[in-house]
């Protein structure tokens, strides 16, 4: 009889990494957020805007905290005092310019130039502030973009737009987004974005053609209605046909703007890398146009009280349409053993806080 | 002493592990099968409660622990924490939210209807007259280029009307310094308008439509009412301020949708202009009374204009008050 080989001590099996898509999910509800929004809005108004810094932190905490991926949540960590400081600086600048504009218009307009020159720095600080105060799975995000590159993409490049009759506009959008995404990181994991030129131009070319067609239809309707209803007769008011044509033109512009944003958002997410992971965004233009259109109507009909409902619907649809495609283990680690959060936090307390959506 | 469970993030990697938590002797103990650590309570910070959201407990060194919304640390809370606790009390129930909604609607409505017009009035009256005159001159130059033609009225006729206008200005008070300009425009038709800085423009078409000189004088008196009330400046200020106000309150994220929220402000705007028209009417009547012009001329002219040109936009949306409404005012 052959002796069975010595029993090999069982090696704990390495759990295979599940490479299936991980959908984002959003669990906020309109009713709960409405109560938070309205109470914070009233407090902001009665404190003449001072409380708005706390309101902002609570709003972002609500939206970050209710967004999750692979069982882990996002977090927003900013201190309201830091935001209040940034806002006070911004208000002081705006008020000073307004007062100066009344007293000495020339001196005020001379000040706009240095302000424009400072804008890229403000952008970079805002990106850094937002990233350093956001976390996922207990690890902070970060933004390492340099000011010199910010000057290139937010000041120099946009200056070419008027001289090329807008032809470089899609290029500007592409470069700005690439800068923003590829200088961002989650802990040690670097984001990356490299868009090809043609797909970006394709979005804007199609939008331009659609707008041209829409304008032709709108202008034809306008002219037709104007002739029928006799616009240009002295003291006559525009008839329903003319008003309809004008509404048609506005609706066309709105629909195009939403469609362009949707296509661009999908394009950006679908080319974004995080380490070995990819993203998949399946926003549909038709659904986005419906959401924006019905949000618009709902907000108008509720005299503005529908804003929370509108925000929650958009956030839910965005999360439902987004998934992470893992390229390996999902565990990410912090930079410098997790100390970056505390170190950068202090440096950023005087950061300007502005909203630039990704 | 409290005991609870939470999800621990060490801040080094994004992996999470469940822990038991307990507080004893000023220390927070976190324990699981392969972890036992403690932090002084003074060094940990619990984020304020927000709805049903699990709360994050920030630990020294970048670690954190996600705990249930109900979790609280022992000991007194500092002032900011107490404030947010109070805010949370308001947020979780419907009654305070509905009261807040009502209060905000009243606040916004009140400031659009009373606050903004009152502020605009003060600002317009304190505005540098030179700035206003320049605005008026610019507006007239633009109109001359695109909409207005030179007047075809003979010099003698202009002189007659200028003299009648001067009498009205004199009646308007010692500070009144207004001038009358003549233009024509087939596209605009029978009309007259007041520009900021003290200029009234009379179109030939109105001069021809009028059946009596006193009708023209009545219209000029009405336009002087717009000038003394600084209506153009106030309208410009109100329109921009009301829009800014509404946008500031409701729209910071949904840039497209904030225009929808500005719609009520637009509807209210239509009423300001009508209020301005009625105010100009009242000033005009006083000037007509002072210079011996019968108010009936104004009413007759308005009624004829409305009959001939009509109005297809309902009264609420129209910026001009209906003739019958103004006639009632004239008969007071």
Image (cartoon, helix red, strand yellow):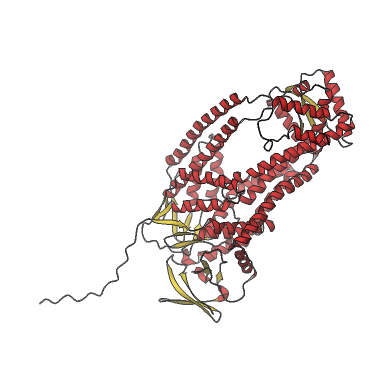
Q: Position of residue A217 (x, y in %)?
A: 52, 30
Q: Position of residue A163 (x, y in %)?
A: 55, 35
Tag count: 0
Q: Is residue A73 left or right of residue B42?
A: left
Of residues A64 and A104, the one nearer the viewer is: A64
Q: Residue at x 45, y 61 (%)?
A: A188
Q: Position of residue B167 (x, y in %)?
A: 88, 29
Q: Is residue B279 left or right of residue A254?
A: right
Of residues A11 and B202, the one nearer the viewer is: B202
Quadrant for residue B285, please give it.
top right
Answer whether residue A265 is visible to the viewer in this image.
Answer: yes
Q: Give the answer, above or below, for where B283 lies relative to B182.
A: below
Q: Residue at x 21, y 76 (%)?
A: A7
Q: Is residue A77 left or right of residue B147?
A: left
Q: Residue at x 86, y 26 (%)?
A: B164
Answer whether residue A261 is visible to the viewer in this image.
Answer: no
Q: Give the answer, above or below, for where A141 lies relative to B313.
A: below
Question: Which residue lies most toward the left here?
Answer: A1
């Amino acid at each position: 009889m052959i002796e069975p080989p010595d029993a090999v001590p069982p090696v704990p099996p390495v759990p295979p990494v599940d490479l299936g898509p991980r959908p984002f999910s959003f669990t906020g509800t309109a009713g709960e957020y409405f109560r938070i929004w309205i109470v914070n809005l009233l407090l902001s108004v009665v404190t003449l805007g001072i409380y708005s810094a706390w309101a902002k932190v609570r709003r972002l905490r609500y939206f970050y905290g209710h967004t999750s991926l692979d069982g882990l949540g996002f977090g927003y960590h900013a201190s309201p005092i830091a935001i209040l400081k940034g806002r006070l600086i911004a208000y002081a600048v705006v008020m000073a310019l307004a007062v100066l504009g009344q007293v000495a218009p020339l001196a005020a307009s001379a000040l706009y130039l240095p302000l424009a020159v400072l804008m890229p720095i403000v952008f970079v600080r805002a990106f850094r502030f937002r990233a350093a105060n956001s976390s996922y799975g207990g690890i902070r995000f970060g933004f390492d973009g340099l000011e010199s590159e910010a000057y290139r993409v937010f000041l120099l490049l946009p200056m070419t737009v008027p001289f090329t009759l807008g032809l470089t506009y899609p290029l500007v959008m592409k470069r700005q987004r690439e800068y923003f995404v590829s200088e961002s990181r989650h802990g040690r994991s670097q984001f990356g974005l490299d868009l090809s030129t043609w797909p970006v131009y394709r979005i804007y070319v199609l939008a331009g053609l659609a707008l041209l067609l829409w304008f032709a239809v709108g202008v034809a309707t306008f002219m037709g209605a104007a002739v029928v209803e006799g616009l240009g007769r002295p003291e006559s008011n525009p008839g329903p046909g003319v008003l309809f044509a004008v509404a048609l033109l506005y609706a066309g512009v709105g629909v195009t703007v939403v469609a362009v944003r949707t296509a661009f958002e999908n394009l950006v997410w679908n080319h974004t890398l995080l380490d070995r992971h990819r993203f998949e965004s399946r926003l549909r233009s038709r659904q986005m146009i419906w959401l924006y259109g019905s949000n618009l109507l709902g907000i108008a009909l509720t005299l503005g009280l529908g804003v929370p409902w509108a925000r929650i619907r958009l956030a839910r649809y965005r999360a439902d349409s987004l998934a992470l495609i893992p390229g390996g283990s999902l565990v990410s680690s912090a930079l410098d053993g997790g100390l970056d959060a505390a170190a950068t936090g202090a440096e950023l307390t005087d950061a300007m806080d502005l909203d630039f959506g990704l | 002493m409290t005991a609870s469970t939470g999800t621990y993030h060490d801040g080094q990697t994004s992996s999470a592990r469940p822990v038991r938590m307990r507080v004893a002797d000023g220390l927070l103990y976190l324990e699981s099968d392969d972890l036992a650590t403690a932090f002084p309570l003074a060094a940990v910070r619990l984020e304020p409660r927000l709805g049903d959201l699990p709360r994050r407990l920030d630990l020294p060194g970048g670690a954190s622990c996600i705990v249930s919304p109900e979790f609280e640390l022992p000991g007194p809370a500092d002032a900011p924490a107490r404030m947010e606790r109070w805010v949370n009390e308001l947020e979780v129930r419907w009654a305070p939210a509905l009261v807040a909604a009502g209060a905000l609607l009243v606040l916004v409505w009140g400031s659009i209807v009373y606050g903004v017009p009152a502020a605009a009035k003060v600002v317009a009256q304190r505005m540098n007259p030179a700035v206003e005159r320049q605005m008026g001159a610019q507006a007239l130059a633009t109109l001359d280029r695109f909409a207005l033609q030179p007047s075809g009225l003979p010099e003698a006729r202009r002189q007659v009307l200028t003299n009648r206008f001067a009498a009205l200005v004199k009646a308007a008070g010692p500070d009144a310094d207004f001038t009358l300009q003549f233009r024509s425009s087939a596209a605009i038709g029978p009309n007259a308008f007041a520009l900021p800085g003290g200029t009234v423009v009379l179109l030939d078409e109105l001069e021809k439509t009028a059946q009596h000189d006193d009708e023209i004088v009545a219209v000029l008196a009405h336009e002087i009412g717009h000038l003394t009330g600084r209506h153009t400046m106030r309208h410009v200020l109100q329109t921009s301020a009301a829009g800014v106000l509404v946008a500031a309150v409701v729209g910071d994220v949904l840039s497209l949708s904030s225009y929808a929220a500005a719609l009520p402000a637009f509807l209210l705007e239509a009423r300001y202009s009508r209020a301005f028209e009625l105010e100009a009417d009242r000033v005009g009547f006083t000037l007509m009374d002072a210079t011996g012009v019968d108010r009936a001329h104004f009413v007759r002219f308005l009624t004829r204009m409305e009959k001939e040109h009509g109005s297809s936009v309902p009264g609420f949306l129209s910026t001009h008050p209906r003739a019958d409404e103004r006639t009632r005012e004239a008969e007071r």
